[in-house]
Image: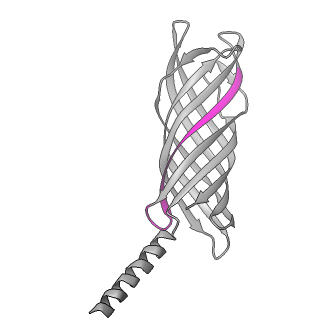
Amino acid sequence: MKKYGALLTTAILLISFSVKAQEKWSVEFRPGLNFPTSDVGNTDTKIGFGFELTGAYKIMPHLAAYAGWGLNEFRGEDSFLAEDITVKETGYTFGFQIIHPIGTSSLSYLARAGAIYNHIEIENNTGDISADSGHGFGWQVAAGIDYEFAPNLSLRPMLRYRSLSRDVEIENVSTDLKLNYISFGIGLAFEF
């Protein structure tokens, strides 16, 4: 009986080590360039930049749930206020991602779909906040490649589309701001 208990204990330990070695968690930092697809309210926005930090948990071998926080910034000229301003989008992102290997190579394709819970701030030349939309929901979709260049480390070039629509009040005038843009970034991901 002791022999079977030792075998059972050894089997449980081996299974728990193999489950632990599956790298269920990942953390990713991704800076990127943002290309607006339209003006934001009265503002002719230019190419922007930003970054995002996300964490993901594998719920199936190729499917993970992700959540994170990011900041994206655009400069432009407001035709109503006749001044240069900065449009900042900050907030949270969450959804699901699929990472599936391409054959036996170290490349995998990556697809994401999810929601954002962000707000839009408009800052004037001196950095003072002229308007804040408050947080609200938007959406995003993304596609890219996951290239594992070292054990548990990957580069993730990704193209995504984000959409957020919020109302703000500027100088007692309510304006509907639609921030829609295409973003390209290369993330660095660590799995553990």
75 inside magenta stretch: yes
Instruction: Determine whether, in the image, residue 133 is placed left or right of residue 88.
Output: left
> From what the image shows, is residue 70 above or below residue 122?
below
120 inside magenta stretch: no
> From what the image shows, is residue 82 above or below residue 20?
above
Instruction: Determine whether, in the image, residue 191 is placed left or right of residue 75.
Output: left
The residue positioned farthest toward the top in the image shown: 172
Give the camera-side residue of 31 and 161: 31
Query: At which x and y percent is residue 85?
Result: 69, 18
What residue is at 47 percent from the left and 74 percent from the top? 17
Query: At which x and y percent is residue 53?
Result: 59, 44
The residue positioned farthest toward the left in the image shown: 1
Image quadrant assignment for residue 50:
top right
Give the camera-side residue of 155 and 85: 155
Q: How is the image coloured?
A: one colour
Quadrant of the image containing the C terminus: bottom right
What residue is at 56 percent from the left and 6 percent from the top? 171
Give the camera-side residue of 103 and 2: 2
> From what the image shows, is residue 56 above or below residue 75?
below
What residue is at 48 percent from the left and 23 percent from the top? 134
What residue is at 29 percent from the left and 91 percent from the top? 2
Query: At which x and y percent is residue 23?
Result: 53, 65
Give the camera-side residue of 31 and 26: 26
- Mainly helix, strand or loop, the magenta region? strand
Q: Which residues are magenta?
A: 59-76
Number of residue marks? 0
Instruction: Determine whether, in the image, residue 145 is placed left or right of residue 8.
Output: right
Image quadrant assignment for residue 47:
top right
Query: At which x and y percent is residue 79?
Result: 68, 13
